[in-house]
Every structure is written in structure tokens, then in C-alpha cells.
Image: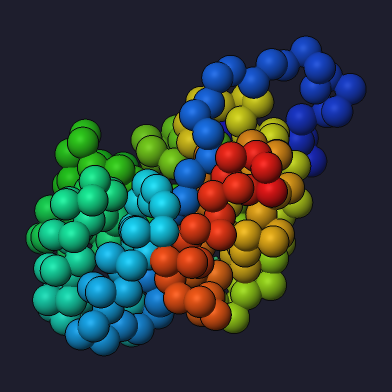
Amino acid sequence: MTDFTEEELALDPKFADQFERGFRPPCQLYLISPPAIDAAFADSLAAAFDGGKVAAFQLRLKGMDDHAIAQAAEPLQRLCADREVAFIVNDSIALAKRIGADGVHLGQSDGDPREARRILGPAVQIGVTCHDSRHLAMEAGEAGADYVAFGAFYPTTTKETLHRPEPSILGWWTTLFELPCVAIGGITAANAAPLVAAGADFLAVSGAVWNHADGPRAGVAAFSPVLAGKG
Ligand SMILES: Cc1ncc(COP(=O)(O)OP(=O)(O)O)c(N)n1
Ligand SMILES: Cc1ncsc1CCOP(=O)(O)O
Ligand SMILES: [Mg+2]
């Protein structure tokens, strides 16, 4: 598998009608924290959860050490448990283990998914960043990831990004694989429809919720129609 080029791995459109996508649950929201938070953030998170169903919350605090993140995580993890939202730690397998997170999200330089599985066990969700690469996604799947993440689909100020996949990568993935895929990067309620239509299992969103003019509750609520395919 590792010997194929991206072009060779692309599903030839002339064969597309020979593949039928199996049943997949409706697309869900995967909320990512702002890059920095304050002591009142738990209230904002609760407000976001009041806006509609959130499947997962990722604590993504760049540039903070694990000890400080563990402290910040405590009330947020409790809130997620109360609201039945999966609590995902970004970047650190060790931190996910230490605080008993429901999952860890690993970028291409954040650690090996097989090692994560060995350390965290079978019940913990492991997600892997795959940028715009079919090849990386299949590698992640083979390594035992629970989801693959493609992005950035749109321009974003939350993170400097180098890759810009087409929505069709989501359709390619979901036609061939059962493993869930996450779409990320600059996603708003206004631009999400093509990603949902293409087959995204989850929309990972930060700025559109935390920077919503009417607050995080409205930010989450705004996604309801598009997630239901009515965007
Ligand atoms: C769901 C999801 N997808 C992608 C990323 C990006 O991960 P990474 O490439 O490691 O970049 P950082 O987020 O660590 O800056 C993610 N965090 N979550
Ligand atoms: C973490 C990450 N990885 C790729 S784009 C991105 C930022 C997502 O945040 P936003 O929804 O504000 O673009
Ligand atoms: Mg990372």
C-alpha cells in the first residue's frame, strides 16, 4: 500500500458507480477548543453544548505544558462526561493516558497510532491528521486509527495550514472505507454543505463556534440545518 502514488490511489470516476456507500449515521459536530482558554471557559463550553448535539470535544491548547493542560482539563472533562460528549486530547498520548481521556488526536508528528493503541488500550479513540492524502489516511486506518481527519478545507486563522483537499476526498473515503472521516479547517455553517454532501462523518469546528457573533450556543445551533442535510 505504501508504494502507491496519490494518483494511483485516487478512485477512477469511471468506476465510481460500481461502489455503493454503506449506511452511515448523519454527520455530527466535533468541537475543537479555542487555542487558549480562561477560567470561565467551562461556562462557554456548557453554552455551546446547549446549542445542539456535539459528539466530541477536543482540548487543543497549543504551547501549554501537559501539567497545565491537565489542570485546565478537569472541569471540562467532567462537563463532557455529564453531557455525553467524548473528551479528546490533542497531540499528547501521555496526557490522554494521565487524565483518562476518551480519545487522542495525533498529527503526523505527534506520535505513532500503534504506540498510542498499545498505551491507551482498545477503548480509547485515536484520530489521525491526514491532510489531503489518501495515502496517509489508508496508513492511519491500517495502523488502527478510529477516525481519519482531512483538511484544511477552507482558509482558517486558527492554524497555519499547508494542505487544501477537495470535498471529493470525503466521498472517496466513505465509498471505500467504513472508518469515520472528519473534515476540518475554516468550516462554518455557511460553507459546510458540500462537506456534508460529500460524506463527512464529522465536522471539526473551532472558530465558527467560539467567534460566533451571538455566542457559542448560537454557533453550535447554526450547524443544525446543515448537519441534517438542509444547509
Ligand atoms: C480533528 C482534528 N483534525 C486535525 C487536527 C490537526 O492536528 P495537527 O496536524 O497535529 O495540528 P495541531 O492541531 O496539533 O496544531 C486536529 N487537531 N484535530
Ligand atoms: C486544528 C486544525 N487543523 C487543520 S485546520 C485546523 C483549525 C480548525 O479550526 P477552525 O474551525 O477555526 O478553522
Ligand atoms: Mg498535533
Residue 118 located left or right of residue 90? left
Relative to 74, is 134 above or below?
above
Determine if residue 159 is in view.
yes
Looking at the image, which is closer to me, 1 or 105?
A: 105
Q: By what rule are the colours in the image chosen? A: rainbow
Q: Picture coordinates of residue 213 (x, y %)?
A: 55, 80
Mark count: 0
Looking at the image, residue 12 sits to the left or right of residue 67; the answer is right
- Quarter of the figure with residue 192: bottom right
Q: Residue at x 37, y 64 (%)?
A: 48
Compared with 231, 47 (above or below) is below
- Residue at image point 28% right, 49% down: 86
- Where does residue 62 sit, x and y in percent of width and height? 36, 79
Look at 48% across and 44% down and name the residue there: 28
* Residue 32 can be seen in this image: no
What percent of the width, then of the height, locates residue 157? 59, 81
Q: Quadrant of the N terminus?
A: top right
Q: Is residue 173 left or right of residue 149?
A: right
Image quadrant in which you'd find residue 57: bottom left
Seen in the image, is 212 located left or right of residue 65? right
- Percent across and percent down for residue 93 are 24, 58
- Residue at (69, 61) in percent of width and height: 190
Is residue 45 or residue 98 the one in the foreground? Answer: 45
Q: Nearer the viewer, residue 200 or 191?
A: 191
Which sits in the foreground, 230 or 65? Answer: 230
Residue located farthest toward the top when viewing the structure as drawn: 18
